[in-house]
Image (cartoon, grey):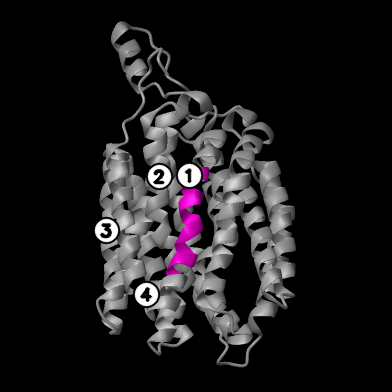
Amino acid sequence: MVAVSGFIMMITSVPIFQASALWAVALESHFGWSRTQLGLALSFTRIEGSLTGPIAGYMVDRLGPRFMVFTGLSILTLGFVLFSQVQNLWMFYLAYFIMSVGQGQAGWLTVMTLLNHWFLRHRGMAMGLAMVGMGVGGLVLMPLIAWLINPDADRIGWRHTAEIFAVITLISALVLPKIIRNKPEDIADYPDGQAPVVADSDSQASEVEQNQELELTIGQALRTQAFWCISFGHGFGSMVVLAIMSHLGLLMSDLDYGLQTAAWIIMLQTSVSIVFQFLGGWIGDLIPKNVALFIFTTIQGIGVVFLVIGPELIYFYAFAVLFGIGFGGRTPLTTAIRGDYFGRASFGKILGISTVPMNVLLLVAAPMAGFMRDELGDYDLAFITLAGLNMVGAILFLVARKPKLTGNL
């Protein structure tokens, strides 16, 4: 389940989000669109997330991850086909919207729900390992995509590259659902592969009660302080991630660095992220996840500051390392903490609803950075502002309190 989840997140996330910094350079060269116009594409994905996140959360709890993976990858295939045929701006927006619908159906929310069903004690590590799988795929795909679509070279180009991804997602839609099992109980197994402990003494009963996982309904979760702190903390921490995905290649282009150089910076950041996606999940299983999230989100924000210190390449390498540590470490924990705090029963619904405030914040991130650059001539103010908002997110994670088993929930 971990391996399949990592592959699904790779094919649904890397070509759409991580590679958006590369697509933007190729599309700007081909069509001459402004930075604001290009940044709006990822905002359309956030509109989709706000509208369909709660629906996807309900559907994954009701119909199961297998169904969601099949339908999501099928929609994503359609989106890649349309993207390969883009002739104008509205077609670009429509294609990105459809791709994001498919990604939302099959990607992060669905596979995290799957892993939340399959793991309890090792939840953080399982989610971290799945993220490592996605990261390793990104490590290979990012320089490959840059090489294929580089507008300064005569290779297959961005259209044919999109067609290749359409074929990959179609094959995945047909094969992967045959492997997935929605819950361990479906095959007479248990989370973590271990049967639940049956208490046969007062001391054991006390230990079982102490380790008992909460099973909150969506209504109960919405009445907790933790739900809102985690949702907005995740949103503020992710704003800068989305802006960098959209504009890092363009920022480096402004400084006369080529697309391949941008791809190597992204590859370094991805490499560091891979290590810390595993370490972050492991650390989150050892110390309180809200504390770990505060630490990693803070490091992520510090990394962003290096983008505005100076134009020298060394600052971009410093950004890649620090941002990779922070982003990699926090990524599995933003989901694992929801499983620890809210349980398994309504996890998909809770995760889906929590994407609404998060996506409202993400909606403004990329176009805001593009607008500031178009108006001011550089990205300095945009990235400093986003680094500050990132720190707000870190503090919100820190103050998120785990709900308790009381009659007031």
Specify the quadrant that holds the C terminus. top left
Which of labels 1 and 3 is toward the front?
1
Q: Which residue is mark 3?
A: 299
Disc 3 to disc 4, how far (Cα)?
A: 20 Å
Query: Which region is colored magenta?
Result: 356-369
Contact check, label 2 and label 1, Cβ < 8 Å: yes
Is residue 258 inside the magenta stretch?
no
- Residue matched to label 1: 357
- Classed neighbour count for the residue bearing mark 3: other residues with Cα under 10 Å, few (<14), some (14–19), many (≥20): many
From mark 1 to mark 3, how far is it between C-alphas?
Answer: 23 Å
Classified by dominant secondary structure, the portion drawn in magenta counts as: helix
Q: Residue 36: x and y, percent? A: 52, 72
Query: Could you tell me how far apart the alpha carbons at marks 2 and 1 are, in whole angstroms?
Result: 6 Å
Q: Is residue 263 visible to us here?
A: no
In terms of secondary structure, where does tag 1 sit? helix
Residue 358 belongs to magenta span: yes
Foreground residue among 28 and 377? 377
For badge 1, the amino acid type reads Pro
